[in-house]
Image (cartoon, coloured by chain):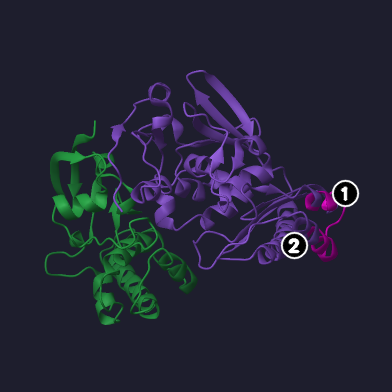
Chain colours: A green, B purple
Amino acid sequence: MTERTIRVTVNGRPWEGRVEARKTLADFLRDDLGLTGTHLGCEHGVCGACTVLVDGEAVRSCLLFAVQMHGAEILTVEGLADGERLHPLQEAFWEHHALQCGFCTPGFLMSLVSFLRDTPDPSEREIREALAGNLCRCTGYQNIVTAVRAAAGRLAGASRGAGTASS
Amino acid sequence: MKPPRFEYLAPASVDEALEMLAAWGERAKPLAGGQSLVPLLNFRLVRPDALVDLNGLGELAGLREEDGWLAIGAMTRQRAVERSPVVRARCPLLADAMPLIGHFQIRNRGTVGGSLAHADPAAELPAVVTALGGELVVRSRRGRRTLPAAQFFQGYLTTALAPDELLVGVRLPAAPPGTGAAFLEVSRRHGDFALVGVAAQVTLDGDGVCTRAAVALTGVGPVPVAAEDAARLLVGQRPGPALFEEAGRAASAGLAPDGDLHASAEYRAHVAGVLTRRALARAAERAREAGR
């Protein structure tokens, strides 16, 4: 079969339909669902701009096929904010000037959401290693490192405030 | 930059996958994590008529200890190996190599079997299997066979796998007590392909005498290179800086790497020697700590 029916949940919304087998997850999100926040830079897994979460884990959406996503839960940059309220990581990027043209930003954000979930109190070295899988060609990385540190503090404070066990 | 059209086949069992591979032969490609194959598809450097997606085959995922070996299913995600306490305890060389494979986003999806079957000459896992004397487990409808690394890796991106065969797992000998390991590499940026990498493992007895040593290099030829001369120098000795230095020279001397735009042949051979020295020193230090 060169086409299949899939059922997926994207940013909390269920979707069911036919997709061509060769369509990457990135093209499916952009073309079929109109979620153009997921950007395509290199289309071979190097630049990280297309990073999304599949079942909670950060992956390159240019290296997956939509047909493989049957039953999966996908989170894209459009699903990060809570209505008008930005995600703490988005706020930190804004406040610390961690973006300039913004093309790479969705990929950075999605990588870092999962990174900070797994590493709530990262060292500078861990932050820099986590950033290595995403390329930024205008701002540089220094402000992104600063933003990640600020977001880590804010997220840790938020989970303490809510009394949730974040470990 | 978009893949060509293909038939998408999603087998529900290994047996069904083997049937599909037998039926399609060279026209089909197994799809594991896709972190190497999908870029090749996107570039249209490969144009299979069918992809046999292995991602539904839970029976190929997971790792366990059996009779002093660590058995890892081909579809085990690299991230799962990286996070495994069993791997850390029983296979320290593999544990040390895992964080060097691509980036964490790649390891979330990339698999152990996919990396081994792709056989990139700069990849880490083939060097680990070569250093440890691991076995690659291969199945087809015709049966099952087990290959050592030297037979499995045949050349640049080339393995002994026939078109109807599937790599189903790898077996690595568990480290004996008093073992330390180190995987070191030089790359332009963390997570990039290594220019040169060295896998080293050292076992010391209670008196600090080396009973076993293994070294394998990646990025210095079409297949991983076992630096047996370098490893042999350590056995029976209480290894120290002079011996590590000598082992580094021995590892470097036997190499004939290709130069390319990333690094000249001379540079690669030199770095191989330096990394061998450092990796053996670190492995021996960790072996001493493990023996305490």
| Residue extent of the magenta highlight | B230-247
Task: Tell me the subunit letter for badge 1.
Answer: B
Query: In this rendering, does residue A53 appear at all?
Result: yes
The tag on residue B41 is none
- The quadrant of the picture occupied by the C terminus of chain B is bottom right
Instruction: Where is residue A65? Give x, y as percent.
Output: 28, 44
User: Residue at image x 63%, y 65%?
Assistant: B264
Task: Tell me the subunit letter for badge 2.
Answer: B
View extreme (top): residue:
B142
Q: Is residue A137 above or below residue B29?
A: below
Q: Closer to us: mark 2 or mark 1?
A: 2
| Mark 2 neighbour density, 10 Å: few (under 14) some (14–19) many (20 or more) | many
Q: Callout 1, which amino acid? A: Gly
Q: Callout 2, which amino acid? A: Arg
User: Residue at image x 19%, y 70%?
Assistant: A86
Instruction: Where is residue B110? Give x, y as percent.
Output: 43, 47
User: Residue at image x 20%, y 63%?
Assistant: A37
Disc 1 designates what residue?
Answer: B236
Disc 2 designates what residue?
Answer: B277
Residue B115 falls left or right of residue A167: right
Q: Which one is in front, A149 or B268? A: B268
2 or 1: tag closer to the N-terminus: 1
